[in-house]
Amino acid sequence: MLNMNSNNKNNIAVIDTETNFFDEVISIGIVIADSATYLPIDKLYLILDPEYKKPAMFSFVLTHERAVVDAVLSRKAAIAKIIDFLNNYEVSSLFAYNAGFDKGHLPELQQFNWFDILRIAAYRQFNPKIPCHCECYKTGRMKCGYSAENIYQMLSGNRQYCEVHNALTDAEDELEIMRLLGHDFETYKIAKI
């Protein structure tokens, strides 16, 4: 882990889940970061048993060179470990890309404040890298092409980037989207769900 001694009330967490074909969570990745810099402090990657044993679109990347598995646990044990992990870093705010999906799959974490990175990244007012030829609604939201992969490519300039669909690597990449957007924590208050 990166820095086990940080206990800063300004910490946030970026969370991502992967599911199987039965819409059950098979893995959860979390990156703790400083809310001022969006630099990572620590991370946690859990695989849920027995859910991960069922067919899933991205089961082949449950293990990945960028994602060290911390534990394979039952869902109940995994949620307890996650809550302890978040509480250790005094996290009260969870961020996710298309956060409604992750929040809906993790009802045990409803006591946290959830924020949707997508609600900032896909809007012309907040993302200066959205090309002028990009079709947007009157609200400024892109009509299409706002997946995490597309936004990461847009912000980083790395057209070779491909989303891994591993819960931990995706959480790390979503944190990088936040860092590249350059908005302070206050801006994300409008993205609360």
Image (cartoon, helix red, strand yellow):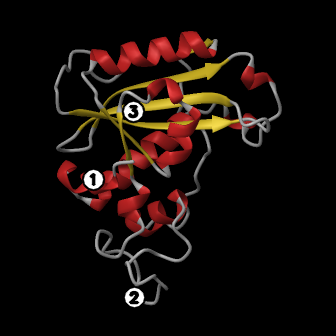
Rendered location of residue 29, percent (x, y): 50, 31
Q: Compare marks 3 and 1 and give the one earlier in the sequence.
A: 3
Circle 2 Cα neighbour tier, 10 Å, few/some/many (<14 / 14–19 / ≥20)? few
| Vertical relation: 193 (above or below) 120 | above
Please name the amino acid that badge 1 sits on: Tyr
| Vertical relation: 125 (above or below) 181 | below
In front: 76, or 20?
76
Which residue in the structure is indicated by mark 2? 132
Q: Image check: 148 left or right of 84?
A: right
In front: 107, or 173?
107
Residue appearing at x 28%, y 56% in the figure: 190
Q: Image check: 68 left or right of 23?
A: left
Q: CA distance from mark 3 to mark 2?
A: 33 Å
Instruction: Please identify the quadrant where the N terminus is shown.
Output: top left
Rendered location of residue 93, percent (x, y): 31, 35
| Vertical relation: 50 (above or below) 116 | above
Q: Compare marks 3 and 2 and give the one earlier in the sequence.
A: 3
Which residue in the structure is indicated by mark 3? 31
Q: Residue 188 got which mark?
A: 1
